[in-house]
Amino acid sequence: MPISVALIEDDAPFAETLQSYLRLSKSVRCVGSYRTAETALEQVPALSPELLLVDINLPKMNGIEFVERITTLCPDLLCLMLTMYEESPRIFDALKAGACGYLLKRTQPAEIVEAIVQAHEGGSPMSPRIARQVVGFFKKSTEAAPLAPTRATSPQFTGLTDRECGVLDLLTKGYLYKEIGDQLGISPHTVSNHLRQIYGKLHVCSRAQAVAKYRGLA
């Protein structure tokens, strides 16, 4: 079945162009488009799409605040940022708010569809320039912190079982649900169940937030 997608984008020409392309794809199905975060916040829960493409620069409530609110209302909903901003603070604010990935608007439509599929399969797609900034941030953080608490000794992880720690460790390394299941000898559905337990114990709403907390960002 195609992945159901909705857009939160106030640039009408851009939204219409992207919708036209998505209609041609067999992998995704665009089920809605909203010009404001407020309207989307009211209507998306009833629409129940699987993934949202979210701009940051929206008229009133911005996209980062929207992601934080909608992922609280709909914990299983994936939010993929699609924006022109490439500053590090906005990237990390979006990921901490619950976004599963971050794309720049100049990304080719075919690559946007690939990113949607990747996110749906458990990945965290990012435009190359964004991924480089994220890698650079972690490299600097590692160099600046000579000794960081390990998963076993960090208080925030003491509530996780060994299996949950194993799932989270593989998730942090970029494994998809199926790949995690293959590594641990469990089904993707069981992986998803473990992740729901992990989110609850870590008080997060998304994979990106869990990974950030694991790495000491939250």
Image: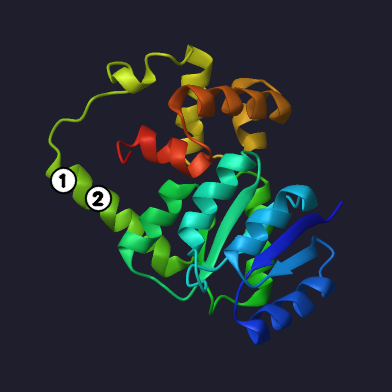
Q: How is the model colour-coded?
A: rainbow
For this view, does 167 lie left or right of residue 179? left
Q: Can you identify the residue that label 2 sits on?
A: 139
Which residue appears farthest toward the bottom when viewing the image? 13
Given residues 165 and 37, the one toward you in this image is 37
Q: Secondary structure at mark 1?
A: helix
Contact, mark 1 vs mark 2 (Cβ under 8 Å)? yes
Residue at 65 percent of width and 40 percent of height: 76
Counting from the top left corner in percent of width and height, residue 190 is at 69, 23
| Quadrant of the rendered image containing residue 107 | bottom right
| Quadrant of the rendered image containing residue 110 | bottom right
Counting from the top left corner in percent of width and height, residue 29 is at 81, 62
| Label disc, if present, on residue 17 of the rendered structure | none
Instruction: Give the amino acid type for the residue marked by disc 2 in the picture.
Output: Lys
For this view, does 87 lie left or right of residue 205? left
**Could you give the CA–CA distance between mark 1 and mark 2, rounded to whole angstroms?**
6 Å
Q: Secondary structure at mark 2?
A: helix
Q: Which image quarter holds the C terminus? A: top left
Given residues 123 and 40, the one toward you in this image is 40
Residue at 64 percent of width and 73 percent of height: 35
| Label disc, if present, on residue 143 of the rendered structure | 1
